[in-house]
Amino acid sequence: MARRRRSSGTTRVVVARAPAAKAPIIRVSAPSSRHLRRRVRHHARSAGRAISSEKHTMVALAAAAAYGFVEKQGYQIPSIGPIGPAGTVGLAAWLYGRMAKNNTAQHLATGLLAIAVNRWVATGTIAGEGTAAFYDE
């Protein structure tokens, strides 16, 4: 039998390392997209309901603004005696709204009659020309 050869020189040491551990997975709890969409739709419906419930206020404000614009332009608005132009148009809109069951006309009347009452309280007259005066005596 032949003799085994021995290595001449240095021997090499191989170091086997354990594989590096993976980074831990951190799960963030977040709502699923289905729940998120449902929540968004719910809030959108709520906002829509809030806006539509104030429709009467918006129409009354628009009527008051339109009346102020017409008055500023200097157009002659017809009036019935002592109630003045704002009261006349407001009364006509109220009657039309009651007879035709038109809510928009009734909301217009609210804005215009509010202007008439404001003039009556502020000046003591509704028409503004002294035709019908209400004074505290």
Image (tube, rainbow, N blue to C red):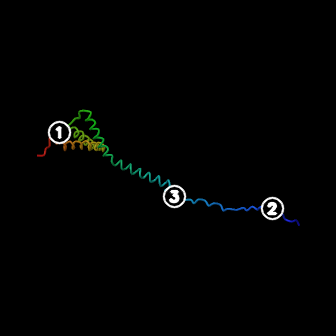
Q: Secondary structure at mark 1?
A: helix
Residue 112 lies in what quarter of the image?
A: top left
Q: Nearer the viewer, mark 3 or mark 1?
A: 3
Instruction: List the residue tagged with mark 1.
Output: 82
Labels 1 and 2: the sequence-earlier one: 2
Instruction: List the residue tagged with mark 3.
Output: 28
Does 37 sit above or below residue 65? Answer: below
Q: Residue at x 33, y 46 (%)?
A: 55
Q: On residue 8, which mark appears?
A: 2
Of residues 127 and 13, the one nearer the viewer is 13
Q: Amino acid at mark 2?
A: Ser
Q: Residue at x 75, y 61 (%)?
A: 12
Q: Is residue 47 left or right of residue 114?
A: right
Q: Secondary structure at mark 3?
A: loop
Q: Amino acid at mark 3?
A: Val
Q: CA distance from mark 1 to mark 2?
A: 129 Å
Labels 2 and 3: the sequence-earlier one: 2
